[in-house]
Every structure is written in C-alpha cells, then in structure tokens.
Image (cartoon, grey):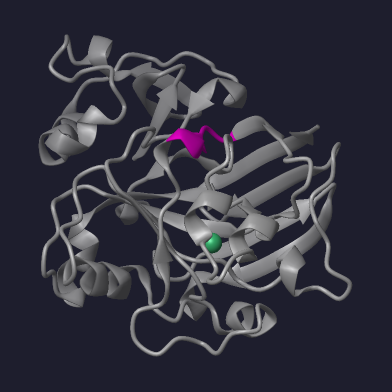
Amino acid sequence: MRIANVSGRLSLVVDGRAVDVEKASDGSFSSDPQAVYERWEAFRAWAGTADLPEGVAFDPAELGSPAPAPRQTLAVGLNYRAHAVESGFAAPEGLPPVFTKFVTSITGPVTEVKLPADGHTDWEVELVAVIGRRARGVAESDAWSHVAGLAAGQDISERVSQLAGPVPQFSLGKSLPGFTPIGPWLVTPDEFDDPDDLELRCAINGEQVQKGRTRDLILSVPALIARLSAVLPLLPGDVIFTGTPAGVGLGRDPQRWLAVGDELVSTVEGIGELRQSFIA
Ligand code: ZN
C-alpha cells in the first residue's frame, strides 16, 4: 500500500493514480495526512478491503510529505560504518548520536531549496520510517509491527553551523527551510521482499555520489526502534531518519558542497525518488 499527501490531502496511490481517502471513505477518515497515523490500524483495515474508485493523475510536484507534521522527528547520525569513518569519527558503540530536524523544515519530494549564502550545504540520502503504533520499550522482534511504512528522505545539512561552536550541534544546521524532504509517498513494510535490505542512491546533476544498502546499517530499523523506545515513547506519525551511507560532501577530498543550479536526486529502492534543485 502506498499512502501519499497530494496537495495536502491524504490519498492512496493505486496504479500510479491518487484516490482521495476522505471522499472514498465517505468522510470516515479525515483528509489530514498526519491524522491518519492515530487511526492506523482502522485505516489499514478499511484500505485493504474498500472498493476504491478510480484515482486521478497527479504531478510529483503536488506531493507533500506523507508525514508533514510529526510530533517528533528523530534523526540518527553515524549509523553506517563507512560514513562514520569518512566523517572522522569512530563508529558508535551503543546508541549513535540522535538529533532532530525541526518540523518547519519538512517538505514533499520535489522542491526548490534556498542555499544559505555563507554555508557549506551537504547531502545525506536516508531511509525514513514512520511510526504507526505507539512504541515504548518495544522488543526488536516486535518493532516492525510499530512501523506504518517507509519513505525516502534527504537529511540536507549545513556543515558550517553544524560544526561551529564548542560542541557540534546537529539540529539547527539540518533544519533550514526545505532541508527535510520526505517522500515521494509512504510504502507499507509488507510491500518489500526484505524491508531490512534496500538500496539507497543519490546523484548530483546525474553524477552518483552515494550508493549503499540498509543491510549495512549499524542499527537496523527494528534495532533503532528498540533502542529509542527504551528511552522515550515513539508516537503515531513520528518520523525516524535512519542515517546516511558514505559519499557525503564533508568526507570528500577535496570537500564538495551543493551549489546554485545543482539538482539532487535521492532514491530508495522499492519506494521512489526525491528531486531537489538549489537556488540562491
Ligand atoms: Zn543524516
């Protein structure tokens, strides 16, 4: 099942076309894409059996984030060994660093992003998990049952402000407007042969800069949910950025940053792509 935010309205994507959920359910479910996670089990049950009308065509630029206003976004740093090495850090023992991407930075999959004038803006393709059932003290073996679905994410990162100051601060430099595209839609875990082994790629102007697989995550999606939910409750509709593989601009020699006019395409196997163009 693919769940999309089409021009701010909750939709199911069927054969590439959008079915409006509020209309198709005669108002049983609200049009608010974020509200559905509070009623996720009921929604899945309805969507799995409903006699849906034919959908309408849509442009990817009309899509918003499938989770546009999560109460919590937890983003995980240094969760692939090769990326920890290129960043100049030891791979973490135990829980990796966790920061947030503030909610105002979240967008849909196809956007223009304004580059900060004095920044060094970097790319990080990531698998994103959205929580579908409250998770507190969840065992790894039960963790997937708390996941509504998976999406592609870009953890766009401004490295000057991230690394300035007495200690690095991740959240602000990763939360400029437009720095958190998510999409193109949410794909439920049952759609994947193996949701723990998906290829991620990212390219700038057609040149591939990152390629990895989620089987190389130090902490997998279930392991992250177990570790994080031991500390705090994960709420329906919460977003988890799971970390980026090697190939970011910070780790290159010479270092490389996004420039005005660049187009960044980020892809996760079995989900789809994000497309960001950068302006002054
Ligand atoms: Zn990241």
Q: Is residue 165 left or right of residue 193?
A: right
Name the residue furthest right.
254
Image point (63%, 64%), residue name: 164
Which contiguous range is marked in magenta?
104-109
Name the residue furthest front.
166
Height in image: 114 above or below 53?
A: below
Image location (x, y in percent) of residue 119:
74, 50
- Of 59 and 124, nearer the camera is 124
Image location (x, y in percent) of residue 64:
48, 28
Image point (64%, 30%), residue name: 111
Is residue 253 in view? yes
Which quadrant, please, contains the N terminus?
Answer: top left
Height in image: 7 above or below 162?
A: above
- Of 14 and 212, nearer the camera is 212
- Magenta span has 16? no
Q: Is residue 208 left or right of residue 216?
A: right
Height in image: 46 above or below 59?
A: below
Image point (57%, 65%), residue name: 199
Image location (x, y in percent) of residue 206:
84, 50
